[in-house]
Image: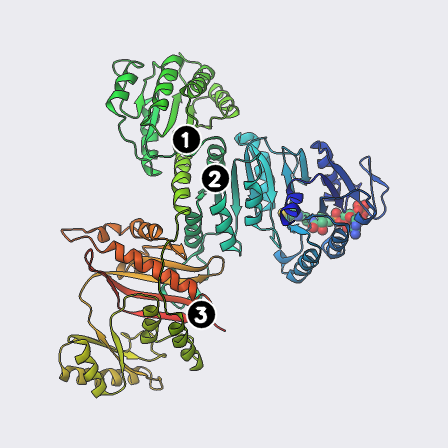
Amino acid sequence: MDRVALNGLLRPKSIAVVGASATPGKIGFTVIDNLIKSGFEGAIYPINPTAPEILGLKAYPSVLNVEGSIDAAVITVPAKFCLSVVEECGKKGVKGVIIITSGFSEVGNRDLENQIVAVAKQYGVRILGPNIVGTLSNSDKMNASFAPFLPLPGKAALISQSGALLIALDAASYTRRVGFDKLVSIGNMSDVNFADVINLLDDDPKTTCISLYIEGFKDGREFIEASRKSSKPIIALKSGVSAHGAAAAASHTGSLAGAAKVYGAAFQQSGVIQASDLNNLFDRTLALSLQPPMKGDNLVIITNGGGVGVLATDAAERYGLPLKFVPAEVQTELKKHMPEFGSAKNPVDLTGMAGNEWYADSVRFALAHSWTDGMVVLYCETAMTNPMEIAQGIKKAVDEAGVKDKPVTVSFVGGERSEEAMRWLVENGIPAYNAPDIAVNAMAALREYSRMKAMATESLGMDIKVDREAALEVIRRARIDGRGALTEIEAKQVFNAYGLPTTATYLAKTEDEAVTLAKKIGFPVVMKIVSPEILHKSDAGGVKVNIKDEASVRDAFKTILTNAKAYKADANIHGIAIQEMAPWGTEVILGSVNDATFGPTMMFGLGGIFVEVLKDVTFRVAPVSHGQALRMLSEIRGAPILAGVRGEKPRDREAMADTICRYANMIVDLADEISESDANPVLVYEETKGIKVVDARIILKKK
Ligand code: COA
């Protein structure tokens, strides 16, 4: 039923426009005019309190007066009338309501928006908007919006959170030669969100690629689920990437978790490709909508110019597709289609003497060869060649190669004749760009899609035994104490309950207890003040390390207490933690935040100066698969340190990845309790020797 209602929004067979107007210049006029001009073949019902007809169509005072059924109602009446109009739509049995009207949550009028959604829910009506431009579909000949015309026909669909941008991209589709079947303005997302539209478009046979312009949303997990499930490539341009919420963060991790990083992590985990800017969104959308994913890393570049060949080679490295020489037998064959001074290695340089035939023969052979996973064909306009003939030769060769699962992108550099040839290529299904690096970037998107899709479907596959009750008990006690944060000892107890290896740590309330515990742990030990009011223990002189005997334990006990009292006279001191002194290892940091959009989110990075100064950290929305955890280890800039540098043995990456998975599992399981947390430092030892969490911090969620 829900799917029917949603489909009513995107592909209605009958549309009412509530607030239709006979006055040119009003949005209610433009929507009717657009529906007629776009050739909409279903019924159009203008709704207006007084007009008997609008633009030649019979008008009705209310949807309730319409005899036929109505799939979708586009609303263009002022905000204050919307609630009663939606109620009437519900009574009429309208499936989906498209609210163009502004003046709701975007200007703080959240109550009215919520009331409308509540009424719609009562009737099972789905709402797109409010505060949108409308929806457009080429295959349904439907311009149910106030955008001027349907976009250039094509196979992509765009969902935009900005209405103005959607209108601009609509027009730009013609100049950029990137075709769309559907444009969906999503606005305030009071009800229908990105996930809903992604699900719908995934079922839509006319769409091969889904492009998103995102400003920000709430239902992050729904988005991840829908994107992961999608059988079509999704590409997102996310704006507003400056750090947010950092000032309020109580943990190290909290201060490092900017919107860009968390969204970026979520995109990666759900197989969503990113665009760096608007141009890049167009360029990548074109490739993703026309070409298959690139399944391996073997890229062949064919060119008639050394310069563009080098530019493309640089770009290939920059975008994660470094070129390799093609196998010897491929070189031997390619040599037949170039002069003596050409190069068959890769990039394959046919030289400026290359005509249609050399191009066609090389493309046909190299694309069909089993080594090749994808191809970028470059052409510099010369006086001896005709760009259109070259384009036609390339297309014919691609068809004759007979491979449907290897992508091809093209770049022609030249004047108007080259532009015309590229238009022809795009119309014939081959993405073509006016710069070699753009053609390579588009190919990289096809490779990223294939790589990320494989990762996004990876199973979380970890059966972790946990003692949830023990962790909750620790948290309960802290809450009874009226505390918003756990002490180090408590945080470690929670970590232990989730299988995270921590240094043995016990609380001593007296000097004698401290001596007994130190002997139990074994010298040397570390001693630290335990007080909910002293979070920065070292600053308070509350930490002593490398304590080697009983006398030193007694000395340290006294000194730490004196220092703590001097630091904060009224601090509530629980006692002193006696802690195993872990042997040296590579310092890393783990941490978590409860992100407003995506919920529990993990951070990993190298510790010490790397996190303090370089902020060399990476994020994943929890839970985290073992494969993703390993990728976290290898994607930070300091990754070589874990792999072993300067004669040091590699660190225990397996144990580290395992710990990330356990940590992620913990923050999901305790999502209602933990707001932020840090394990800092965590020491990573040589391969097979494991890891140890040395210090722990957990900030509780406010209840
Ligand atoms: N049922 C049907 N029609 C109704 C009605 C009702 N309950 N109440 C009013 N109307 C009619 C009006 O009589 C008018 O028709 P008329 O021209 O024949 O008199 C028509 O609906 C429009 O109402 P009007 O009061 O003239 O509003 P308007 O056209 O000036 O503005 C909006 C209406 C929705 C366009 C405006 O409130 C708005 O929100 N604009 C911003 C939209 C936008 O930019 N959205 C996307 C942002 S990305």
**Residue nearest the viewer, comparing 192 with 639:** 192
> Tag 2, which secondary structure?
loop
Q: Residue at x 28, y 21 (%)?
A: 330
**Residue nearest the viewer, comparing 42 with 616:** 42
| Residue 233 numbered mark, or none | 2
Q: Nearer the viewer, mark 2 or mark 1?
A: 2
On the picture, is 392 further left or further right than 151?
left
Whether residue 246 is visible here, answered yes or no, is: no
Work out whether mark 2 precedes mark 1 in sequence or the reverse, and give the earlier one: 2
> Tag 3, which secondary structure?
loop
Work out whether mark 3 precedes mark 1 in sequence or the reverse, and give the earlier one: 1
Whether residue 419 is visible here, answered yes or no, is: yes
* Picture quadrant where residue 667 is located: bottom left
**Residue nearest the viewer, comparing 163 with 4:** 4
Q: Are marks 2 and 3 in contact (CB under 8 Å)?
A: no
Q: Nearer the viewer, mark 3 or mark 1?
A: 3
Tell me which amino acid carries mark 3: Glu
State the CA–CA distance, disc 2 to disc 3: 36 Å
* Picture quadrant where residue 250 is located: bottom left
Q: Give the residue pinned by disc 3.
A: 673
Q: Residue at x 20, y 82 (%)?
A: 556
Position of 341 relative to 295 (above/below): above
